[in-house]
Image: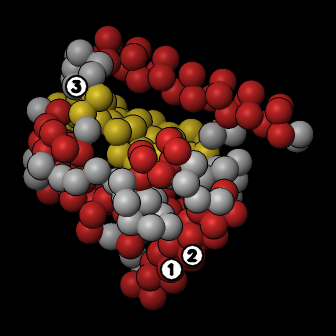
Amino acid sequence: MNPDTLLAAMLAERERRAERRAALSAECGATVVQLTICAPGVRKDGADIRRAARYGAALLEKVLAERGLRTLHGESRDGEAGPCWLWVVEAEASLVKGVAVGLENGYSLGRLWDFDVYGPEGSKLDRESVGSDARTCFVCGSPAAVCAGRRLHEPTEVARRFSELLERGMVELDSNGDIA
């Protein structure tokens, strides 16, 4: 697929995700969680990326259940923009965001997981709303939004660092025999 066609397909997939999130929020009136992988560039899918996402999804479901937080609905799909999971959770959005940030901060693959949490009215909670720092850059450790917004690093360097983090996470999964 040529780059322009791939970009158009990825943008269309992201729009479908947003529409589905809005529909779930309107139908259920509860917290909506979306898990994707923070994959730079156009490589958003692959067996290793899907496995990393499955692991994050399984951990979220496990921790929600352990805390007695009821999942009303869950679904997943793979698309041009990579794997995506959506859940509707019967709990305060800030509580769910705290759980998600704990997973993002507590696992090697957590830096690659992007758990977005939306309140029943559809507003997205940021990490700072639960007392956590903003995401850091794969390359330099500064706030990721600053580096990405200003394109401070070469795309090849960001992609190389992402691949290193993904590979390290896969090695840990293989050695731990975890649930993915």
Q: Is residue 71 left or right of residue 15?
A: left
Q: Are marks 2 and 1 in contact (CB under 8 Å)?
A: yes
The amino acid type of the residue labelled 2 equals Glu
Amino acid type, callout 3: Gly
Residue in the foreground of this view, choosing between 111 and 136: 136
Residue that numbered label 3 is attached to:
119
Q: With respect to residue 74, does 109 lie above or below?
A: below
Label 3 sits on a secondary structure element that is loop
Q: Residue at x 63, y 67 (%)?
A: 157
Residue 21 lies, in percent from the top left, at 41, 23
Disc with the residue nearer the chain's start (3 vs 2): 3
Given residues 16 and 101, the one toward you in this image is 101
Judged from the image, the secondary structure of the residue bearing numbered disc 1 is helix
Residue 36 x/y as whole percent: 48, 46
Which quadrant is the N terminus positioned in? top right
Percent position of residue 17, x then y: 51, 27
User: Mark 1 vs mark 3: which is more N-terminal?
Assistant: 3
